[in-house]
Image: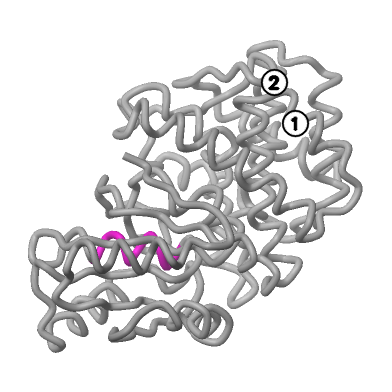
């Protein structure tokens, strides 16, 4: 299901995959960043391809961008034997996978993640989609890429903010599945590219194992939503209110981890000592979000979350580190209390 190739020689394998499947045409979806930093490496291994360039960022993961991708495929005579290579971060792989899955009722696509976030999270697990009015991933499908090729050296091209963007998902994976990994992460003083490269494979294995067992999120896969109910609401709020300076996904997840760990402490008696360690880690490695959010609007955003059931806001919480529990509900008052806890903690 999650066929992942990892390492320094992945593009030799990519070339063989293209040849083995005898694709009629090869398209490469990219943005201004991956065109500059990643395409020069990839094109050494591709003999003939057509590029489709879109703007980077979560704000462009919408129906207008999807229409542009479909129209470009169509005018270049893409057929069902064509393949789309998604060369980019999480937003690009989301929309690229969605467009490939729906064009001509589905063509093959391959993910080549270029950011830490997409390497450890977004490119894995068969979720493809786009945003609707800035509500995260409301439109989408489950569909696996033909293969995922992870070239870890790409993270050397990233700004520190992008490294932190991916770090939040690595932390989430450790907290829901691997206490030893969390203890290791907590002790790291500086997250440079060398330290982060050593964590990529562990994080990939956690997400791949979970999504392989539950590809369509009927049960186990819901553990991956830890931190994300509040994170998605804050991310939507920020996209609607912060102009071009809206929060990155990982920055919102870091806030969500703090808030939902607090809710875990209140509902599930998640140990206070672990809550304090999580908060101190987030304070040390992530900047504070200074915007004065509207708590009523945030709860409204949560009520539109795709994970909800019977109009109840669903959370994945922690009993302890490595022991998550899904389908949890809490009062609006406790949600507001957790948001205030974040503000006061920082």
> Looking at the rendered structure, which numbered label has been put on residue 182?
1
Question: Could you tell me if the residues under marks 2 and 1 are in contact, i.e. CB atoms within 8 Å?
Answer: yes
**What crowding class fits label 1: few (fewer than 14 Cα within 10 Å), some (14-19), or many (20 or more)?**
many
Task: Please state the extent of the stretch shown in magenta in the rendering.
Answer: 91-99
Q: Residue at x 40, y 61 (%)?
A: 13
Dividing the picture into quadrants, the one containing residue 279 is: top right
Q: Position of residue 240 (x, y in %)?
A: 52, 66
Which residue is more in the foreground, 90 or 82?
A: 82
Q: Secondary structure at mark 2?
A: loop
Q: Secondary structure at mark 1?
A: helix
> Looking at the rendered structure, which numbered label has been put on residue 321?
2
Rendered position, 212 above or below 61: above
Lateral position of residue 203 relative to residue 184, left or right: left
Mark 2 to mark 1: distance in Å? 8 Å
Q: How is the image coloured?
A: one colour
Lateral position of residue 319 relative to residue 218, left or right: right
Rendered position, 233 above or below 31: above
């Amino acid at each position: 299901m999650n066929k992942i190739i990892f390492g320094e020689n992945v593009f030799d394998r990519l070339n063989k995959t293209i040849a083995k499947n005898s694709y009629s045409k090869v398209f490469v979806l990219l943005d201004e960043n991956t065109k500059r930093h990643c395409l020069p490496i990839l094109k050494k291994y591709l003999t003939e391809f057509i590029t489709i360039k879109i703007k980077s960022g979560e704000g462009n993961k919408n129906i207008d961008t999807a229409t542009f991708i479909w129209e470009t495929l169509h005018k270049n005579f893409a057929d069902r034997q064509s393949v789309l290579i998604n060369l980019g971060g999480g937003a690009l792989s989301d929309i690229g996978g969605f467009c490939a899955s729906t064009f001509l009722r589905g063509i093959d696509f391959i993910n080549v993640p270029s950011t830490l976030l997409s390497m450890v999270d977004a490119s894995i697990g068969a979720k493809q989609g786009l945003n609707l009015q800035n509500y995260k991933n409301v439109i989408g499908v489950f569909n696996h890429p033909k293969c995922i090729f992870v070239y870890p050296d790409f993270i050397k091209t990233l700004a520190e903010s992008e490294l932190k963007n991916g770090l939040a998902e690595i932390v989430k994976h450790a907290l829901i599945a691997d206490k030893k990994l969390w203890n290791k992460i907590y002790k790291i003083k500086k997250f440079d590219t060398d330290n982060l490269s050593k964590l990529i494979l562990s994080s990939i294995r956690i997400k791949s194992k979970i999504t392989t067992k539950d590809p369509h999120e009927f049960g186990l896969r819901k553990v991956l939503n830890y931190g994300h109910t509040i994170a998605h609401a804050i991310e939507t709020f920020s996209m609607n209110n912060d102009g071009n300076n809206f929060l990155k996904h990982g920055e919102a997840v870091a806030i969500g981890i703090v808030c939902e760990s607090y809710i875990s402490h209140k509902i599930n008696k998640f140990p206070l000592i672990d809550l304090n360690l999580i908060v101190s880690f987030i304070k040390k490695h992530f900047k504070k979000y200074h915007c004065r959010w509207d708590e009523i609007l945030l709860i409204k955003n949560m009520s539109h979350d795709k994970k909800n059931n019977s109009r109840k806001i669903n959370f994945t919480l922690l009993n302890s580190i490595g022991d998550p529990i899904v389908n949890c509900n809490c009062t609006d008052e406790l949600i507001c209390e957790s948001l205030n806890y974040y503000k006061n903690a920082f």
